[in-house]
Image (cartoon, helix red, strand yellow):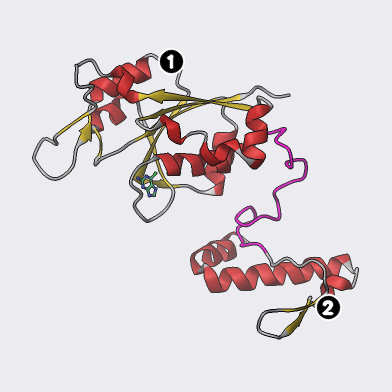
Amino acid sequence: MTAPFHVALFTLFPEMFPGFLGQSLSGKALERGIWSLETVQLRDFATDNHKTVDDTPFGGGAGMVMKPDLLDRALHAHQPLGRFIYMTPRGKPLTQKMAHALAREQRLAILCGRYEGVDQRLLDAYDAEEISIGDYVLSGGEPAAMILLDAIVRLLPDVIGNAGTHDEESFENGLLEYPHYTRPARWTGPDGVERAVPEVLLSGHHARVAAWRHEQSEAITKERRPDLWEKFKKND
Ligand code: 6GU
């Protein structure tokens, strides 16, 4: 087995973890020791009686900012961090390529912010990689961190179900995946319409099946993701 993958996760809500990462493929991998998750309660590093973790922003405005001195104590106590990631909607959008790159690491530290964010100087001092999971705003980085970890863990070597390749999955070849079908070959839906499986899939003709799937991938990508389609055409 290759070296296990260790994640230190810094949050005010450690009870949220492992959450869905404790189930299914990632849960099995966790049990088998292929990866490990240590959650760190940031509040434990507060030094005052009120256990203060945030303060009002300089310059005024709404919301609170997580204190750099508190975060520094938490991070300092967990060296070496490995790659240091801060989950934020301001970050670089997560891609399958980034998930592959992160799956090659041995250690990851992930900071989940709450409130308006964290003091920029802490991010600068620790050279944080800022990652977002998409163009919408969540109330905290925790669900985003879980999604990032799900994308990474399934790519780790030795994860069950990972024996084959990921070549045919959406994004791996720059296209969205083709549609899937299983028995029965003819099925009547709630609308009373009988729908058949595309004939080519029953033909047993592997080259024709592959060609059909590729066509479907292209058509779906063109329609749903013109941005991906343009990139695919350029690289092809
Ligand atoms: Cl990483 N965090 C938050 N709070 N919202 C997000 C996000 C992250 N990615 C997309 N929206």
Taking the image as shown, residue 34 lies to the left or right of residue 165, namely left
Quarter in which the C terminus is drawn:
bottom right
Q: Which mark is residue 79?
A: 1
Label 2 close to label 1 by CB (< 8 Å)? no
Question: What amino acid is labelled 2 in the image?
Answer: Glu
Kindly state the secondary structure of the residue where label 1 is placed: loop
Q: Which residues are magenta?
A: 157-177
Res 218 seen here: yes
Q: Which mark is residue 199?
A: 2
The correct choice, above or below, for 45 with respect to 232 in the image is: above
Residue shown at 26%/21% (left/top)?
70
Name the foreground residue: 189 vs 103: 189
Magenta stretch contains residue 43: no
Can you tell me whether the CB of the residue at mark 1 lies under 8 Å from the nearest atom of ligand 1? no
The correct choice, above or below, for 49 with respect to 216 in the image is: above
Magenta segment's dominant SS is loop
Magenta stretch contains residue 158: yes
Name the foreground residue: 134 vs 53: 53
Question: What amino acid is labelled 1 in the image?
Answer: Gln
